[in-house]
Image: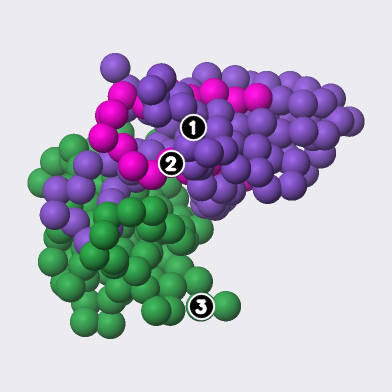
Chain colours: A purple, B green
């Protein structure tokens, strides 16, 4: 079983639609959770951290359910510029490292259509 | 902009050759991590360098090695290249913290390696 699992998509949605991405993780000891965005042939960039209480940043809402080991990302009022791959990320076990390594899912491809 | 810089951006090698990729971390960062991203996959952790030592390592063979210099820059070396080593190699820098909490990584644009 993969440590972080996501539906690879693609998700094809019209502009203005609401779209939800889901992710599950296997390591119950994980402490930090993120969504990264990656544009085609570019590097991943942090979209937002995910907290148990849920957090919102404009049109983006992230939720964490520790009991179910489940993370979600909701995008409201989709824009063409939201088209990208969305990567679910959790921190891996720290074997004495300076900072935690990150475990990435395979990513979910979103294509927003005009 | 003192972000993470990587070189070269693209390179082509043949099987059996060796390659060295370079990374300069974001200004103020002292930790460098390397990730491999194959086509259609998420990045996979290779290893991490801090204080010029390898601190953590992912599931990669010994053909993958690295180094960190006193100025915090880093190199990734891959020996005896295989076709399967073709990927985007990402360098990410961060600032070491005592508590292993939510540390933010800054990624470079990557080095795209093609092995023929």
- Look at 25% across and 47% down and name the residue there: B46
What crowding class fits label 2: few (fewer than 14 Cα within 10 Å), some (14-19), or many (20 or more)? many
Give how far apart the Cα atoms at labels 3 and 2 are. 26 Å
Quadrant location of the C terminus of chain A? Answer: top right
Residue linked to disc 1 = A64
Direction right: furthest residue: A114
Residue B2 numbered mark, or none: 3
Q: Nearer the viewer, mark 2 or mark 1?
A: 1
- Read off the magenta span: A20-41
Residue found 65% across the figure and 25% down from its top: A20
Residue A105: assigned label: none
Q: Nearer the viewer, residue A5 or A24?
A: A24
Q: Residues within 10 Å of mark 1 (few under 14, many from 20)?
A: many
Q: Which residue is mark 2?
A: A33
Single out the mark in the foreground, 1 or 3.
Answer: 1
Image position of A26 with respect to B53: above or below: above
Residue A49 place in picture, x, y as percent: 51, 47
- Compare residues B12 and B23 and report the one nearer the observer: B23
- Element type at marker 2? strand
Marks 2 and 1 sit apart, C-alpha to C-alpha, by 8 Å
Q: Are marks 3 and 2 in contact (CB under 8 Å)?
A: no
Q: Secondary structure at mark 1?
A: strand
Residue B34 in the image, given as x and y percentages of width and height: 31, 54
Q: Callout 3: helix, strand or loop?
A: loop
User: Which quadrant of the rendered structure holds the N terminus of chain A?
Assistant: top left
Q: Chain of mark 3?
A: B
**On screen, residue A98 above or below A72:** below
């Amino acid at each position: 079983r993969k440590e972080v699992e996501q539906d690879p998509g693609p998700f094809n949605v019209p502009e203005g639609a609401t779209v939800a991405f889901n992710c599950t993780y296997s390591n119950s000891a994980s402490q930090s959770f993120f969504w990264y965005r990656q544009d085609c042939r570019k590097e991943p960039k942090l979209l937002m951290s995910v907290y148990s209480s849920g957090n919102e940043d404009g049109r983006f809402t992230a939720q964490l359910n520790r009991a179910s080991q489940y993370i979600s990302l909701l995008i409201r009022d989709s824009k063409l510029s939201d088209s990208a791959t969305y990567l679910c990320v959790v921190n891996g076990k720290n074997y004495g490292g300076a900072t935690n390594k990150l475990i990435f899912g395979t990513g979910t491809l979103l294509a927003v259509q005009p | 902009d003192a972000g993470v810089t990587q070189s070269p951006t693209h390179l082509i090698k043949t099987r059996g050759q060796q390659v060295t990729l370079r990374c300069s971390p974001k200004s103020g960062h002292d930790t460098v991590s390397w990730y491999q991203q194959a086509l259609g996959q998420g990045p996979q952790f290779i290893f991490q360098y801090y204080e010029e030592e390898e601190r953590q390592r992912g599931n990669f063979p010994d053909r993958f090695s690295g180094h960190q210099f006193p100025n915090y820059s880093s190199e990734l070396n891959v020996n005896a290249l295989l076709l399967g080593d073709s990927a985007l190699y990402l360098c990410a820098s961060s600032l070491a913290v005592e508590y292993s909490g939510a540390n933010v990584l800054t990624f470079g644009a990557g080095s795209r390696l093609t092995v023929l």
